[in-house]
Amino acid sequence: MCGIFGIVCASKRDDLGEVMVRAARRLSYRGYDSVGMATFTGNGQIDLRKDVGDITKTNAQLHFDAMTGDRGLLQLRWSTFGRPSTTNAQPHLTMNRDMVGAHNGNITNNPFVREDLQAEGATFESENDGETLVLLVEKYLSRGMSPEEAYTQVSHDTEGDFAQVFMRRDKHEMYAAKMGSSLYLGLADDFICVSSDLPSILEFTRKYVRLENGDLVIFDDKNYRIFRLPEQQYVERPVTVSDIDIENANKEPFAHYFIKEIHEQVEGTHNLLSLYDGTSVWQDFIEALDSADRVFMTGAGTSYHALLLGAYYFNKLARLPVFPSWGSQMLPLYAASVREGDLIVLVSQSGETKDLMNVYEWAKAKGVARTFSVVNNIGSTLALHCDGMIPICSYLEISVPATKTYTNQVLCFLYAAMKLAEHRGIPYEGITWDDLHRVPRLIQETIEMSQQPVKELASVLLEHPSMHILGHDMTHPVAMEGALKMKEVVYNHPEGMYSSEFKHGPLASVDEGYPVIFVSLPENEDLVLSHMNEVICRQGIVVHVGQPSKGYDKIAHYKLPIPAMGNPYLRRR
Ligand code: BG6
């Protein structure tokens, strides 16, 4: 996905590099293939440093934190055009060496723009589309165009979704264009900065401006102006003062944010229940679900797994069938049949994920269906623009792999399914409000009782680059989420799938010592035991995650027990 950041200060700062490294660390989840930084050193020289690797490795080699200057920009790359290499790393210099820029996103017509520029005499140093964009901006600026005119031409020449930062030697200012990828402007006391995400801005200031697609912002250390490229006019955008205190967000006493946020699930679920119980914040969601002809729910990664579990809750408790999809799958799978009266629920922690923005923009342009967002970031595009929004109140998520936001998304759906059932007068069984309010305590117990068995199991699984994680019924999305978490954290290859499907082909991958993890509900014990036996026959390793029982205890080689809950709705990973 890549990340960009740019900053303009009043005069030379000896700590500019340190400031930029802090921003890069916040953005590090956006790209580990290469990192590059460029500053104007104060005497008009450009200091450009870039190399392959993540921010920790490249900073150790190139000492970004020692860079100085009055302006700087940086990029963290996740390769799309051109393999990870120093030359393909961004930022890129212009041909005249007077300007420098970097982008994130994709210029989908890059090969054609590049050919056109080459035909006009441009020479490229890399295969990267970021360089194409830099040379394109140079082409128009060097013709004497204003930034507004140059970027208008650039917007006509390029296709794709991206954002770019750019600076030049002869002007104490910076240009940043938002053309489909996220971009925020930060207003600090002594500088102005721009970044791909909000947490990296909040690192320095709580005052920010959310930019819109088609915005070009031209800024120095004190002033900025926003020019709308499509309408060719200047606009004012509201300045938001965030109440998120990122400076005080620290991981102590935990080793890293991932484990900290696992522990924060206890407080997070408690906060969500308190908010929902004490207000009618969920009311609009219930009404939207109840009045819709059909409900489509879409999300990416972890958010997809949460909504898939939500689909089980809505079906089982409120008799509401839901059409689930990945964000990128929603339109190919359902667009032709979405009609007036339908509801599209967009589920996202960040509220900015591009695949979901595409669905939102399609729905808005067509005007066919209502949109409702289930989000954590309540200042995000989806939160602000959908017809309705319900927050999941997980506060700031800093760890790249989602944990506490998944739990709160799931809890939000369970709460909504119970409310909807009551609203519709549908009697449901298997869960009570008291059960729901036991969730924070059950999470605490699960964390405590898992410590030792998790350590033992981890030392076994570490030996295996590949494994399957199987779930059945409501544990299927949990198995998928467990597999995603392992991929994101361990970089190995666990495959999450529906356990009954395992025998239709994938079972062939089991041989001596191959691990298969079963996430189970007591209700499905007979079925799961038979699936476990299929693995045992092939001398595979069987791991059981779930409420203990005599059957599982007898068969499974390793066990990760969770507390007995007495109902089927609260099982988790
Ligand atoms: C992916 C992340 O890019 O986006 C996943 O790697 C995340 O971890 C997914 O779950 C969706 O993000 P969001 O913010 O829309 O929930």
Image (cartoon, rainbow, N blue to C red):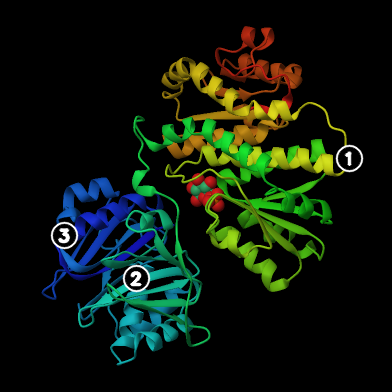
Give the alpha-carbon distance from disc 1 to disc 3, as whole Å.
65 Å
At label 1, counting other C-alpha atoms closer than 10 Å, the crowd grade (few under 14, some 14-19, many 20 or more) is: few
Q: Is mark 1 within 8 Å of ligand 1?
A: no
Dot 3 amino acid type: Met
Side of 276 where 343 appears, left or right: right
Q: Amino acid at mark 2?
A: Val
To which residue does mark 1 refer?
425
Q: Secondary structure at mark 1?
A: loop
Vertical placement of 545 versus 403: above or below?
above
Find residue 67 and name its label.
Answer: 3
Residue 118's place in the image compared with 86, above or below, is: below
**Looking at the image, which is closer to me, 554 or 387?**
387
Residue 534 pos. (x, y %): 67, 18
Q: Nearer the viewer, mark 1 or mark 3?
A: 1
Rounded to the nearest whole Å, what is the CA distance between mark 2 and mark 1? 55 Å
Disc 2 element: strand
Numbered disc 3: secondary structure:
loop
- Residue 174 pos. (x, y %): 30, 75
The numbered mark, 2 or 1, whose residue comes first in the sequence reads 2
Residue drawn 30% across and 92% down?
Answer: 143
Quadrant (top left, top right, bottom left, bottom right) of the C terminus = top right
Q: What's the residue at 49%, 77% (across, down)? A: 214
